[in-house]
Structures are given as structure tokens and as C-alpha cells.
Image (cartoon, grey):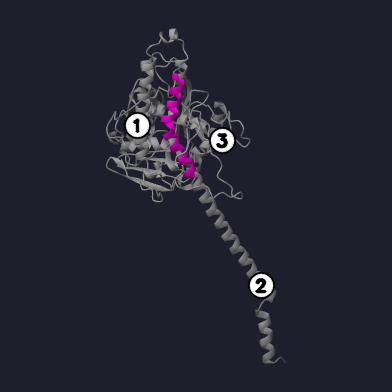
């Protein structure tokens, strides 16, 4: 027979685990909590570092714009020095040159005036006073140096959305322009394309004819960030990107660029018009995404057709400029620029080289855009791989874009992912892979498929070709130049097959 006291002891011994197990469990929970805290701290430090890198990158881009007058004047001084080395007899044969140099200085001043007004209207979305000091940590995996080529053929960048009833979405998705290592392909050298941007997730609504920017976290006013202490001297390659932007303005926003727009944009617009004939009758207009939207004209034209249109751009160079044109232009022809002054080569005459171009050719706010027009800044893959975009788009339009990829297969996969079943992908452009000739970067990736392989890969992601042809076109070409680079661009319409 067992006593009650013995029973109590036995029960206690049965219910309580051995002391060492309690200690071990508590230690495990403490270690887990510490690991969670360490991980959160690492994430915060990583975020702080990325924001500081973003601020540094944006300062560099702004500095490139601000360095434009000085860099252009240095070019002019070089031309003047060469002229002075001529013998008196040779100088007498070109007596108009001193006057030409004076005219060039006035042209540079006009371009600089436009640039400075553009920068004054820009509201930095991040605190540009941030610095990398104290942020860098060798144990942190810094965001990879995204390289984007800004070329005379395909200058694409980021811009805000625009006028009446529009939205500007700024996505915090690898939109940083690691400019230091980005390669400029937008000159009519072998390559041509664009740049970068990274911003906090925000939406900017439109009021009347202007976009209301609410940049929340930015601590600097629209003028404080122009303080000389925040400016730096940048390599000339950065200023070359500014010159590319000026040429792209002609392509998208000048009457002189109408011919190129007819070559590249018109076939796309006509195809969209024919594929969605009943869009005006639908309660919700079809939605079209335009990756690599550049200065925004194509996305605007698609919106004017009656689509919900969103342009996506990666370059801060482009974003700053397109924001100004889309949101702050008051009347057509408000500004005068001189896009062709930076090269003396292949000019038919001095007057051709120094001719003015008026911009914009239309008033964006009065163009007749559809409610829902927007511009989204960020890396295409990073932004649109989010599950919220899966199967949401009726059409994707890519114009001089797909060859900007490190991995074009990933582009095709993403386009397939975000299209609805039965949605269409309209493409126009060459395959001038922007990273094909990148040297000195062992980790640089560049997948360069032939057109045949591109179509084969597309079929693996559920695409069927409905139309296909070749279109001859130029890209940011001076129509009065003795050199005209032409592309025989692939144009196609592919439809995503419906899931069985």
C-alpha cells in the first residue's frame, strides 16, 4: 500500500521534466530570439546601406546634368585651340569659325537653361545628404551593381506618370543606377540604351494638369539638393549620357522625331488598335504595360488609344527628364534645345548642326490620356516578378527593350508570367545585346540569343506567333547627318496560349 505522501512525490516526479531539459529549452529559445534580432539588424543595415548607395547614385546623376555646361564648354575650347593652330592662310579660308564658336556657346547656354529648369522642378524621392560613411560593412551583401546601357539607339529611363487622372508609381525594386560601372551604349557606336532609379513605394496622384509628388521621406527641398556641397565632378561618360537624353527628347517630344516615331511606334499602335477593337465599350479598358518606356511618349500614345497604360523605366536620367516634360510642360514648343551641337562630324552645314528644336511638340496634359495612365520606376524583373502582377496584363509592348537584359530568357519568362491567358506581346527592336561587350567584369552575365532562339524560348513559355515582319528604322538619328545608322528590327505579335 502506498501512502498519500508517496503518491504526491511520484506525481510530481512524473509531471516535471528533468531540470537539464528545462535549461536546454530556455537556451534554445534565447538563441533563436538572438538569431532573429541579428537577422533583423542585418536587414536594417542592408537597407540603410542600399539607401545610402541610392543617394550616392542619384547625386552622381544630378551632378552629370549639372556638369553638362562645363563639359560642353571644354569641348568647345578644344575646337577653338585647334582653330588657333591653323596658319593665317588656312584661317582665312574659314573666317566664319569664330562666329560659329560664339553661336555654339549660346546653344550650350540654351541647353543648360533647360536642364537647370528641369532639375529645379525635380523633387528627390530620397534624402540626398545620406553618406556611405558608417554604412558599409564587409559582411553585408551589397546590392549587385546593376548595369544598364544608355545608348543613342535605346535611351530608356524612368519618368513619373503625368497629367490628368494619372498615377505615378515609384517602386523600390533595384532601380539604383550603379552609374560608376554602367556602360553607355546610347551613342551611335555599337550600342544604344539607358539608365536607372530606386525609390520608396509611393503613388502620386494628379491634380489638374500637374502631378502631385508626395515624396514623404525626402528631407531636402527641391532647391536644397542643388547645394554645391552635394555636387561632385563626374566622368565625361556620365555627361555623355546627358547628351544622349537630349537626343532622346527629340525622338519622343519634338516634331523632328515624328518620322522615327512613325517607324517604331505607329506599327505598335496600329496593332493594338486592331487587336482590341471593342475596348471603348468595355467597363474596364484593357491594360497595357510598356517596359523600357524611356521618356514616356509611347506609353502616352497607348493611353490616348483608350488603354490603361503603364510605362516602366529603370533610368533616373530618363525619369528626371520625362517627369519634367510630362508634368510641367505648359504649352507646345515651350522649350528650345540644340541636340546636334556636340559633334562636328558628318554635318552638311553649320546651320544644320546648330539648328534649334522646339519641345514638346504636344502638351502632354491635353493629349487625351485614359484614366489610369502611370509610369513605374524600377528594374523590370524586380518590379513585375511580384505575385500581384501575375496574369494581370492584357498586353505587353516592348520597343527597343528586350536586348537590354542580362538574361533575355528571364525577360521572356516574366512577360509570360504577367500576361493574362490570351494576352498579347507586341515587340519591335533589334538584338543589340547591351552587355555583350562588357569587359573587365568576370561576374558580368550576358545571354545573347539569336532571333530564332528567342522565338523558340518564347514558345516554351506558351507564346504563339500571330504576326511577324521586319521593320527598317533609326534610333535618335540626326535626320540631316551624313551618317544614318539603320536597324532592321524584328516586329512581332505573340499571344499567350490559354492554360488547358
From the top left corner, tell me how far across and down residue 116 is, in percent: 36, 35
Q: Are marks 2 and 3 in contact (CB under 8 Å)?
A: no
Q: Are there few (<14), some (14-19), or many (20+) residues within 10 Å of tag 3?
A: some
From the top left corner, tell me how far across and down residue 252 is, in percent: 38, 29
Residue 357: within the magenta?
A: no
Q: Are there few (<14), some (14-19), or many (20+) residues within 10 Å of tag 1?
A: some
The segment highlighted magenta reads 54-80
Q: Main secondary structure of the magenta part?
A: helix
Q: Secondary structure at mark 3?
A: loop
Label 2, label 1: how far apart the Cα atoms are:
72 Å
Residue 347 to residue 59: above or below? above
- Determine whether, in the image, residue 55 is placed left or right of residue 110: right
Place residue 343 in its image quadrant: top left
Q: Secondary structure at mark 2?
A: helix
Residue plotted at (34% across, 31% down) = 113
Residue plotted at (47% across, 48% down) = 130
Residue plotted at (40% across, 18% down) = 479
What residue does disc 2 label?
23
Res. 244 visible in picture = no
From the top left corner, tell me how far across and down residue 72 is, in percent: 43, 27
Q: Secondary structure at mark 1?
A: helix
Amino acid at each position: 500500500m502506498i501512502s498519500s505522501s508517496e503518491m504526491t512525490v511520484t506525481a510530481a516526479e512524473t509531471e516535471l521534466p528533468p531540470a537539464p531539459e528545462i535549461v536546454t529549452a530556455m537556451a534554445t529559445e534565447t538563441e533563436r530570439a538572438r538569431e532573429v534580432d541579428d537577422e533583423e539588424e542585418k536587414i536594417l543595415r542592408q537597407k540603410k546601406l542600399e539607401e545610402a548607395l541610392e543617394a550616392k547614385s542619384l547625386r552622381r546623376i544630378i551632378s552629370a546634368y549639372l556638369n553638362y555646361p562645363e563639359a560642353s564648354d571644354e569641348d568647345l575650347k578644344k575646337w577653338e585651340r585647334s582653330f588657333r593652330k591653323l596658319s593665317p592662310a588656312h584661317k582665312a579660308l574659314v573666317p566664319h569659325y569664330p562666329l560659329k564658336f560664339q553661336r555654339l556657346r549660346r546653344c550650350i547656354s540654351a541647353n543648360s537653361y533647360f536642364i537647370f529648369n528641369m532639375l529645379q522642378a525635380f523633387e528627390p524621392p530620397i534624402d540626398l545628404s545620406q553618406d556611405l560613411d558608417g554604412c558599409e560593412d564587409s559582411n553585408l551583401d551589397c546590392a549587385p551593381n546593376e548595369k544598364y546601357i544608355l545608348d543613342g539607339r535605346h535611351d530608356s529611363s524612368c519618368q513619373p506618370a503625368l497629367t490628368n487622372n494619372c498615377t505615378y508609381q515609384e517602386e523600390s525594386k533595384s532601380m539604383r543606377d550603379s552609374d560608376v560601372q554602367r556602360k553607355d551604349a546610347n551613342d551611335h557606336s555599337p550600342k544604344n540604351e539607358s539608365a536607372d532609379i530606386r525609390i520608396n513605394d509611393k503613388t502620386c496622384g494628379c491634380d489638374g494638369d500637374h502631378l502631385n509628388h508626395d515624396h514623404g521621406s525626402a528631407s531636402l527641398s527641391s532647391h536644397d539638393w542643388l547645394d554645391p556641397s552635394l555636387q561632385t565632378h563626374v566622368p565625361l561618360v556620365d555627361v555623355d549620357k546627358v547628351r544622349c537624353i537630349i537626343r532622346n527628347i527629340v525622338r519622343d517630344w519634338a516634331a523632328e522625331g515624328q518620322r522615327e516615331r512613325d517607324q517604331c511606334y505607329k506599327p505598335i499602335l496600329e496593332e493594338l488598335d486592331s487587336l482590341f477593337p471593342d475596348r471603348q465599350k468595355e467597363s474596364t479598358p484593357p491594360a497595357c504595360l510598356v517596359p523600357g518606356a524611356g521618356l514616356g511618349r509611347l506609353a502616352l500614345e497607348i493611353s490616348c488609344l483608350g488603354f490603361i497604360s503603364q510605362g516602366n523605366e529603370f533610368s533616373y536620367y530618363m525619369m528626371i527628364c520625362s517627369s519634367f516634360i510630362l508634368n510641367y510642360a505648359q504649352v507646345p514648343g515651350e522649350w528650345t534645345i540644340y541636340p546636334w551641337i556636340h559633334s562636328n562630324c558628318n554635318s552638311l552645314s553649320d546651320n544644320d548642326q546648330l539648328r534649334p528644336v522646339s519641345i514638346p511638340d504636344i502638351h502632354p496634359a491635353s493629349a487625351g490620356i485614359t484614366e489610369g495612365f502611370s509610369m513605374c520606376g524600377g528594374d523590370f524583373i524586380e518590379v513585375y516578378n511580384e505575385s500581384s502582377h501575375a496574369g494581370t496584363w492584357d498586353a505587353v509592348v516592348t520597343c527597343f527593350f528586350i536586348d537590354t537584359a542580362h538574361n533575355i530568357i528571364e525577360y521572356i519568362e516574366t512577360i509570360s508570367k504577367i500576361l493574362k491567358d490570351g494576352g498579347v506581346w507586341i515587340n519591335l527592336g533589334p538584338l543589340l545585346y547591351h552587355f555583350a561587350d562588357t569587359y573587365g567584369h568576370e561576374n558580368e552575365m550576358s545571354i545573347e540569343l539569336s532571333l530564332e532562339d528567342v522565338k523558340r524560348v518564347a514558345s516554351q513559355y506558351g507564346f504563339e506567333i500571330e504576326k511577324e515582319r521586319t521593320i527598317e528604322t533609326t534610333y535618335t538619328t540626326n535626320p540631316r547627318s551624313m551618317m544614318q545608322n539603320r536597324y532592321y528590327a524584328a516586329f512581332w505579335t505573340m499571344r499567350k496560349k490559354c492554360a488547358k
